[in-house]
Amino acid sequence: MTNVVITGTGLFTPENTIDNDALVATFNAWVDAENARRAEAGIEERLAHSSTEFIVKASGIHSRHVLDAAGILDPERMRPRLRERGNDEASIQGEMGAIAARQALAHAGVAAGDVDLVIVGCSNLERPYPAVAVELQALLGAGGYAFDMNVACSSATFAMETAANAIRAGNATRALVVNPEICSAHLNFRDRDSHFIFGDACTAIVLERDDLATAEARFEILGTRLTTRFSNAIRNNAGFLNRVTDADPQALDKLFVQEGRRVFKEVCPLVAALIGEHLQALGFSGDDLARMWLHQANRHMNDLIARRVLGRDPAEGEAPVILDRYANTSSAGSIIAFHLHRDDLAPGALGVICSFGAGYSAGSVVVKRV
Ligand code: CO8
């Protein structure tokens, strides 16, 4: 069978950062203004303040990178302000994708023209068509074919399986998987339960047929396993039918909405079982893992999943955490962890990249350092 290897990764990190204190100050300023409005209107129900202490304790998040901080931190606006691109300009996701992709290609020592599959996978695409992936293919000068896909936070691992299968089937030789996540654009910064959760970033991964790869450092994909189970606990009702159902496009259900505690309880066992069963099917166990690059939503979730898979507390660095400074970047999270925390692994070391989120969906990619 054709072996598929990961030979390069890239990461675009927006320059702007917002720490918890700044985010909470804006939120609380808006709450005070809103409560004053309510008092004036004779409405009894009052909104509660947010707090940095809660955010750190509940999630492990300290700060996040965003494409635009000023719009988010303006209590009158509380959403990013991004310039609309003309049809003759690169789209925002195309631009982020090109930066991350060029880094990944340089890392892999692959010319863009030798790529024959580009998959853009993310939680929200800035337009339905033409596919951002096809635009990115043109921006990079890649060949072959390209398409977009969306499996929310699991988009990267689902796209990796798709790319690996295309390479194994002989339909592609070198693939780029790109995850441009602009989470700040679909987050309700006036929702106390979730205003702190997300950040923006874009990752890129190069996958190649092993016999064609030239990069010295490679990670062979030993197997992929995906699972989905329908749930409304994480939902976003924005869609092209909003216009014809006369739904209010500004209604809050057209943004990210979740029952966080329920997600925590239901997703952790699902993910731990997925990784455990996947390892077993490949003839391994948790004891064989040198590293777990987990989806970055919540520090406690990752600790719990790692503990269940390994059968003990993870040692420092065994399940690297990047959400402290990136927050949840949806599908980019596990790939950022992989991008930043893999070079120290010795040949033969085994690891798992695992993402999970809305759907529910979860994907496991078991890799071996070659
Ligand atoms: N400040 C202070 N107190 C607060 C705040 C706040 N900001 N928010 C809530 N509280 C209070 C609550 O009111 C509650 O008070 P009380 O006990 O008096 O009722 C108390 O704190 C506890 O509240 P919770 O039970 O909600 O808190 P948790 O400990 O459960 O923590 C979390 C909340 C951090 C959200 C946690 O539940 C969590 O991380 N869950 C998992 C979430 C997750 O992984 N979701 C996956 C989403 S990602 C995904 O699938 C991709 C979607 C597409 C991307 C979308 C981009 C925008």
Image (spheres, rainbow, N blue to C red):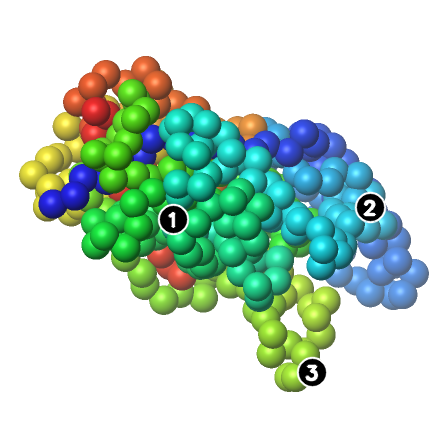
Q: Earlier in the sequence, mark 1 or mark 3?
A: 1
**Which residue lies under the disc numbered 2?**
75
Q: Position of residue 196 (x, y in %)?
A: 61, 42
Q: Based on the displayed image, in which of its 4 quarters is residue 217 positioned?
A: top left
Q: Is residue 48 left or right of residue 103?
A: right
Badge 1 element: loop
Badge 3 element: loop
- Check disc 1 and give the amino acid type: Asp
**Which residue lies under the disc numbered 3?**
246
Q: Is residue 13 left or right of residue 281?
A: right
Q: Residue at x 36, y 45 (%)?
A: 175
Name the residue furthest right: 40
Nearer the observer: mark 3 or 2; the answer is 3
Q: Position of residue 184 (x, y in %)?
A: 64, 47
Judging depth in this view, the residue of 130 and 299 nearest the camera is 130
Bin the neighbour count of mark 3 within 10 Å (Cα to Cα): few under 14, some 14-19, many 20 and up.
few
Judging depth in this view, the residue of 125 and 299 nearest the camera is 125
- Check disc 2 and give the amino acid type: Pro
- Check disc 3 and give the amino acid type: Asp
Q: Based on the displayed image, in which of its 4 quarters is residue 74 positioned?
A: top right
In this orientation, does residue 236 appear? yes
